[in-house]
Image (cartoon, rainbow, N blue to C red):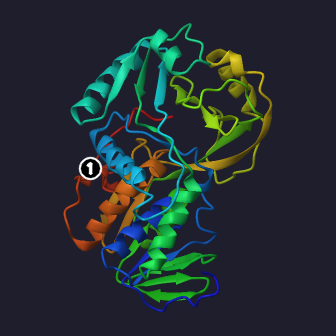
Amino acid sequence: MRGAPLPEAADVVVIGGGVMGTSILFHLAEAGVTDAVLVERGQLGSGSSSKAAGGVRTQFSDELNVLLAQRSLAAFEDFGRRPGWEIDLKQVGYLFLLTREEDVREFEAGVALQNRLGVPSRMLTPAEARDVCPPVEVDGVLAAAFCATDGHLTPEAVVAGYAFAARGLGAHIQTRCEVTGLRPGVVTTDQGDIATPAVICAAGAWSAAVGEMAGVHLPVTPMRRQIVFTEPVQGLPDDLPMTIDFASSFYFHREGPGLLMGMSYAAQEPGFSTEQSDDWLPDLQAALERVAPSVAGAGIKGGWGGLYEVSPDHNALIGRSGDLLYATGFSGHGFLQAPAVGEVVRDLYLGLEPFADVSAFGAERFDAGRERPERNVV
């Protein structure tokens, strides 16, 4: 809290107060590492976490991502008990609409992998896709992929739940506290220094700068993504799934009586600006009219801009370099993997074997030519 004094020393300092940082802090505190400090330059969740679409899914092309997503989904399902917070989880499913032959082949392979790992995903015909999501137009759709246990929830609630529980276990959270430098054994902030033998970078789109302070190359690029909300739409099913037109990245899910919608914008330049703009709206409208023309007349009543933390292969950076541990670069799927990654980073800090071997996600893979592309990204 802003009014509390900054501790002069800690066993570990977590940089970043979004869903990743608060998950890590909670899992550390739960394991008995209560002399832990989280520093956040703004308010908790004020970066990318509060701007996320809130989707949670297990449909990935990379086995590690499937494992992390499965573990996280189970944690979200149990969130009301542990850590103990309402997150409004709606398991209405994730539907990917596929309009290119190569995407159909990729998703068929992905579903086979997911099924082998216990994920109940399946391929659908276009007619079956329309049954699952009545507003969609399936002309041009070759096939679809669907998993009924996926869905969406409230991102800010996850951050609040982890933070509340971590504080209750004795961890310290310092907001409006910006890290200005790192040197061996010391984290320097605009509120003073913290002596610590270990630092964890969970700074999202700002991670490259934190890594640079520590002399560690974290190739994370900030990229603006925008979301809009519609006016109420009549006749939306209560169980409308999160629906993605994979070729264009256009997606929507129900938000109250209307829709939340978003997509990538091909002309978007990297950078930290989150100001809303209108330049992408013609592309959004065109995608909406093609994918779900029955709801294309809904008016827009608001929205926001946020940041993706993009890595070169659209996969996470999780690992350790000396005294710096890091969990960043998730390229759009960090929110949904945060519970599992919190466990993994806790175990890396404690010198334990995590439930999944994430060594392939180390940042050094890029220098070694071992990129590990995740294909199922939007």
| Res. 15 in view | no
Residue denoted by label 1? 360
Q: How many marks?
A: 1
Horizontally, residue 239 falls left or right of residue 9, namely right
Task: Residue at 41% x, 86% y: name it.
Answer: 10
Label 1, secondary structure: give it: helix
The image quadrant of residue 117 is: top left
> The residue under label 1 is which amino acid type?
Ala
Which quarter shows the N terminus? Answer: bottom right
Horizontally, residue 147 falls left or right of residue 172, namely left
**Looking at this rendering, what residue extends furthest in the top direction?**
139
Vertical relation: 208 (above or below) 299: below
Vertical relation: 5 (above or below) 119: below
Task: Residue at 54% x, 31% y: name it.
Answer: 239
Q: Position of residue 104 (x, y in %)?
A: 39, 17
Q: Position of residue 78 (x, y in %)?
A: 39, 54
Vertical relation: 319 (above or below) 276: below
Task: Residue at 77% x, 27% y: name it.
Answer: 298
Horizontally, residue 144 falls left or right of residue 65, namely right
| Res. 207 in view | yes
The image quadrant of residue 125 is: top left
Within 10 Å of the Cα at label 1, are there few (<14), some (14-19), or many (20+) other Cα atoms?
A: some
Q: Position of residue 116 (x, y in %)?
A: 21, 32
